[in-house]
Image: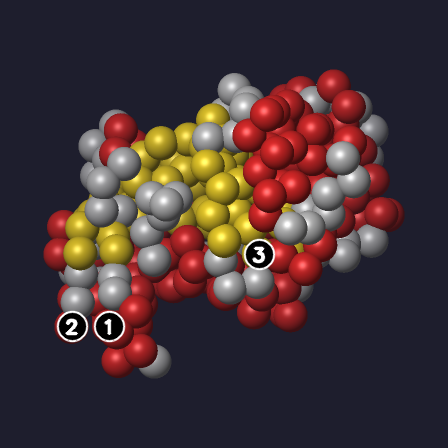
Amino acid sequence: MSGHSKWATIKRQKGKADAARGKIFNRLIREISIAARIGGGDANANPRLRSAVTSARAQNMPNKNIENAILKGTGQLEGVSYEEVTFEGYGPGGVAILIEAMTDNKNRTVAEVRHVLTKAGGKLGTANSVNWMFKSVGIIRIPKDSIDEDSLMEVALEAGAEDIAGEDYSFEVTTSMDTFEQVRSALENAGVQMESAEMTKIPENTVQIEGETAGKVLKLIDALDDLDDTQNVYANFDISDEEMNKLG
């Protein structure tokens, strides 16, 4: 249904590992600070900030951490100033890769991203070389044990959701960027428990990878995702469950 590449699942699994070592907290703090700096510190009037705060709370981030991140973003508390940068490139097998980062030193981040790509046999692309291959959407995940599918569909679709899919332990609600906030609000008002609510990107089309190429791509994505300044990595590949099992 959703059009996600297999990386969507891999990314969520990795996210759980990151949470154990605190890395996901750092990413969320940066996102909260940037959102507050751009749109103000009132989450009720700033959809991006509200989304970041929702994700932070889903990860059990302490309220004090969230409050401090907002204050740093609005300039009421001293802290490092980050800027958003996007890198576009290609990996093995012609896989298109989009990297979103937040950094206090753009030159350092460019060098790190280029090094990882080159080492893996990929290359850094020019502006808009792959960005057009990805569609911005809203993704809301709801635990399956918190609501039945019919009730969820009634609320979400009426509010403007584009699609609903059942995964192993959760439902995934897909929205357009324009309807993301109204769908999220409708679910919240209906008392629906949300695992996460985020604005993200999915590939319009995917490249099937397997064998040695699949292994190289997954290692590259993992290496890019592990860079300190990386916030999100998107790639337009797909890989079969059978192939994933082979790779372990």
Q: Residue furthest front?
A: 150
Q: Nearer the viewer, residue 152 or 220?
A: 152
Q: Which mark is residue 211?
A: 2
Q: Are there few (<14), some (14-19), or many (20+) residues within 10 Å of tag 3?
A: some
Amino acid, disc 1: Glu
| Above or below for 179 versus 84 | above
Looking at the rendering, in which quadrant would you find the N terminus? top left
Crowding near the residue tagged with mark 2, few <14, some 14–19, many ≥20 C-alpha atoms within 10 Å: few
The count of marks equals 3
Q: Position of residue 152 (x, y in %)?
A: 62, 41
Instruction: Report whether residue 82 is seen.
Output: no
Q: Is residue 5 something one can see in this rendering?
A: yes
Residue 170, label in figure: 3
Type of amino acid under label 3? Ser
Colouring chosen for the image of the structure? secondary structure
Q: In which image quadrant can residue 192 be found?
A: top right
Q: Callout 2: helix, strand or loop?
A: helix
Q: Is residue 45 above or below residue 10?
A: above
Q: Which residue is mark 1?
A: 243
Which comes before the other along the chain, label 1 or label 2?
2
Residue placed most toward the observer, 102 or 173: 173
Q: Nearer the viewer, mark 3 or mark 1?
A: 3
For the residues labelled 1 and 2, say whether their Cβ atoms are less than 8 Å apart. yes
Q: At 60% from the left edge and 43% from the top edge, which residue is drawn?
A: 150
Q: Secondary structure at mark 1?
A: helix
Q: Which label is found at residue 121?
A: none
